[in-house]
Amino acid sequence: MARAVSTRRKLLTTVFAWLVGLAIFFPILWTILTSFKTEAAAIASPPVWFNFHWTLDNYVTVQNRSNYFRHFSNSVIISVGSTLLGLIIAIPAAWSMAFVPAKRTKDVLMWMLSTKMLPPVGVLVPIYLIFRDLGILDTRIGLVIVLTLINLPIIVWMLYTYFKEIPGEILEAARMDGASLREEIIYVLTPMAIPGMASTVLLNIILAWNEAFWTLNLTAARAAPLTAFIASYSSPEGLFYAKLSAASTMAIAPILIMGWFSQKQLVRGLTFGAVK
Amino acid sequence: MTTTFRALMGACAFGALATASMAETITVATVNNGDMIRMQGLMDEFKAEHPDIDVEWVTLEENVLRQRVTQDVATKGGQFDVMTIGNYEVPIWAKQSWLVPLTDMPEGYDEEDLMPAIADGLRQDGTLYAAPFYGESAMVMYRTDLAEAAGVTIPDAPNWGQIEEAAAAMTDRDNEIYGICLRGKAGWGENMAFISSMANSMGARWFDMDWHPQFDSEAWSETLTDYLDLMNNYGPPGGSGNGFNENLALFQQGKCGMWIDATVAASFVTDPEESTVADSVGFAQFPNKEGMEGTGHWLWSWNLAIPAGTQKEESAKAFVAWATSKEYTQLVAEREGWRAAPPGTRTSLYENQDYLDAAPFAEMTLNAINGVDILNPTVDEVPYIGSQWVGIPEFQGIGTAVGQQFSAALAGQVSAEQALQSAQQLTEREMTRAGYIQ
Amino acid sequence: MATKHSRAAARLMISPAVILLLGWMIIPLGMTLYFSFLRYNLLMPGMEEFTGLANYRFFLTDPAFFAALKNTLLLVGGVLLVTVVGGVLLALMLDQPFFGQGIVRILVIAPFFVMPTVSALVWKNMFMNPVNGLFAHAAKALGMQPFDFLSAAPLASIIGIVSWQWLPFATLILLTALQSLDQEQLEAAEMDGAPWIKRFFYIMLPHLARAITVVILIQTIFLLSVFAEILVTTNGGPGVASTNLTYLIYVQSLLQFDVGGGSAGGVVAIILANIVAIFLMRMIGKNLDA
């Protein structure tokens, strides 16, 4: 039931909201703009806004220096792979926590979340040694494993909150009809939890895409994703704002576009059981 | 089994590509400096000479690179076949047998041609453990036009007093001209490289013969006070965040009157495509304290080394030899002009008239490098080898922690005395822990 | 509803996740614990020896330790404060009817997709740089001295950067929660003549309490280990002004390659993180059960 709002007020809100929105978005906008400038224009004082000589040179330079598409495909494989693997492990766990709660379910859940508080730098050397012995340094499978483990607690927790919102009676009805546990999960539970799952998947792809510590430290050339690609642009010699901007734009564009297209799903599911 | 698995994964991903070429792939870890980036652009030439070797690059910022390669070589992770390391690391790593000795270099490599000042630091019992890619000392780079306008002359061998006078005369804050740009960003390879050199030129040293730190000495106090005075009065804003690259950008934009830093910067600041002040750069020796002698207190080289345990030693050696050869220098000269040739590694370069004509900084660089004695970096005797660094494994950590203190002093968070006091304490603490001080 | 059969099945189904996470926790943690009692420097192999608690003594007596502890709390607290308050305000704004709502929402959530490394690089170089940054240009245009963010106010600058990244997350969750608020209740309050401020504090805020706890929980987990932003912008300095615990351990174990000392630091950090965790869990647990 919408309230009647005066047009004047709506206009005022519009202006204000757009200003705030643009201010928050501005750093990204500025980076994208700068990526089309020459290095000299990128540091010009006073800054130039749109009336500069637009050029694609920076993108060409960046692509010549590093193989963007390989980093890109590594990023895609690693983030999607770890999210799917995480989902496969997390769905049964979340199901049993939500529908067959035991006395310590909550503790188990909280413990899972607390494993995310391990400072990664503290355990890098042990993990590096283990990876070396397993022969999975600089492999995508190695990164998929690490990122799955890192994000698993979040996936479990998110799914748990969505599953909990589903009334138990529906599952019971399905069971009465003779559905097996597997069928119950696949045909009854999963469709109902789709919005929640969609946002779980999206959130985890974003987190995995942006994870910079493990992906940088456990890769060299073959499995290096975009986080490693951007690492070669931090403080090189000479002027580099335009090249940095081009590389940055290339690194964030895919996930930004994905995020924008799927923002409805992302928003719809991001409740964490927080809404009642 | 894991190899098969990986091979399968690779085959799936790259399909026809993987099966079509039988070339061996070596992974080269390098720092994102201009000369190395240039080398990446010349890989088609390498490929033409060595069709059976593919090169994968891992290009990282200096600090990250150092952490990655050290961790990898120390744990024998085997992720890299060629590593770019400094002359600080080479002796330490060679002693641990972490590096493949560079004997049997290909025909015509001409090891004799490598500059003794640089190559000696890379040898262990007469054997070369890393090949120098470029070498550097430090010197003063200044704007001849600004100096003239301000009515100051900077002698070829200035002292710190003359530097301060010149800085004062050239500073024009309203027009964003800062008399002097120096490193301020914390790090053993950043501000401590400069400040340690300055300390050497002032007669200060890091440790006495019993490994006791010397930050409580008069010479150190003088060094830090002078450094802070210079930067606070005539330096750019945000000095405590500026390292080599930031200062290079400032100088290229024409915002610095003087910049005292690595000689390798000379080819960047005189590059008309990159630098707005390319035509008006003068050079002078690294300054000394008035009345003191010495031409160089800074010696650094970026070198290519092969970690022990690589499966691809032959290909790696072929690459190292190519990248540090006379032919490579020639190649760069052909493509980008002589001025861009990687400096400071080969005597022949400094005998080449084309180079000397194209590079006004050549002689100054040569003198500065040859003037350094890493066994005797300063007036008093020291127990370590080094110049702007101290050749012990603990130095990275200690140097950076001390650098943080000096950076804090530059940011105005602590006074010079406090910074020196903290530096003294923390160095004493670390050296005791490491067992140097009993 | 739970039968014996389904209980057993439930155990079975939860076990892969539990076993994996247990392994992920215990194996590296065990190794870290073991290393923390050794004198173990990567640069000096073959010299490992048992040293008892020396590494812990060394780490805990480091003058930088308390500074790092304080900075960690300030960083987490500061970012939480900014994002929760800012998130509530933004959510209230986005909840109003206005033209182009969808697009503004897209603009507001965009920073969440940006890699921490990229955002740190962009903020440091293109905005906060005192000579070439946009803020410096703005200051000069207004005739003021450019402010040197990263050396004059390093921690606050980092809090700003990190807050920018996490603001969208808080906004999204709070917005979802706000949209589920019973409109009739609000309208009834409006009819009764309750001023806006009262409606906010007595109806909206209590309704948002759960969402706010969730934001705090999730963000704390990530904020405790903020690292890339510090590495890229200030390297923990000047001095130790922006060194948090994670960064201090990094310095110890990966800059000095003192694995023993770094491990001891890691163990200390894990213990501290768990204290925070227990505290948080209590708070959340209570709030989520309600």
Image (cartoon, rainbow, N blue to C red):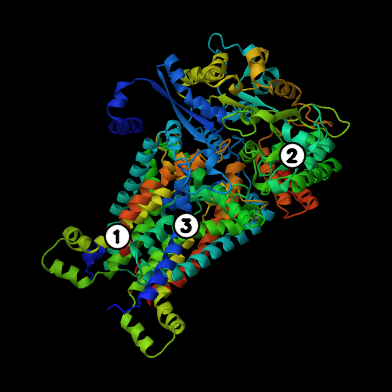
Q: Residue A110 is drawn in which quadrant?
A: bottom left
Q: Residue A194 is drawn in which quadrant?
A: bottom left
Determine if residue A100 is in view. no
The residue at the point 48 percent across, 67 percent down is C86
User: Mark 1 and mark 2, same subunit?
Assistant: no
Q: Are marks 3 and 2 in contact (CB under 8 Å)?
A: no
Where is residue B411 drawn, in percent x and y? Answer: 70, 52
Q: Residue furthest top?
A: B107
| Amino acid under disc 3 | Gln
Where is residue B233 drawn, in percent x and y? Answer: 77, 47
Rounded to the nearest angstrom, the CA distance separating label 1 from label 2 is 55 Å
Q: Which residue is mark 1?
A: A265
Up-down relation of residue B101 to residue C81 (above or below): above
Where is residue A20 drawn, in percent x and y? Answer: 46, 64
Q: Residue furthest left?
A: A177
Q: Residue furthest right?
A: B291
The chain letter for the residue carrying disc 2 is: B
Q: Are marks 1 and 2 in contact (CB under 8 Å)?
A: no
Q: Residues within 10 Å of mark 3 (few under 14, many from 20)?
A: many
Position of the C terminus of chain C, as image quadrant, is bottom left
Q: Which residue is mark 2?
A: B195
Q: Secondary structure at mark 1?
A: helix
The chain letter for the residue carrying disc 1 is: A
Q: Which residue is mark 3?
A: C165
Q: Secondary structure at mark 3?
A: helix
User: Mark 3 and mark 2, same subunit?
Assistant: no
Q: Secondary structure at mark 2?
A: helix
Nearer to the camera, A57 or C128: A57
| Amino acid under disc 1 | Gln
| Amino acid under disc 2 | Ile
Rounded to the nearest angstrom, the CA distance separating label 3 from label 1 is 20 Å
User: Mark 3 and mark 1, same subunit?
Assistant: no
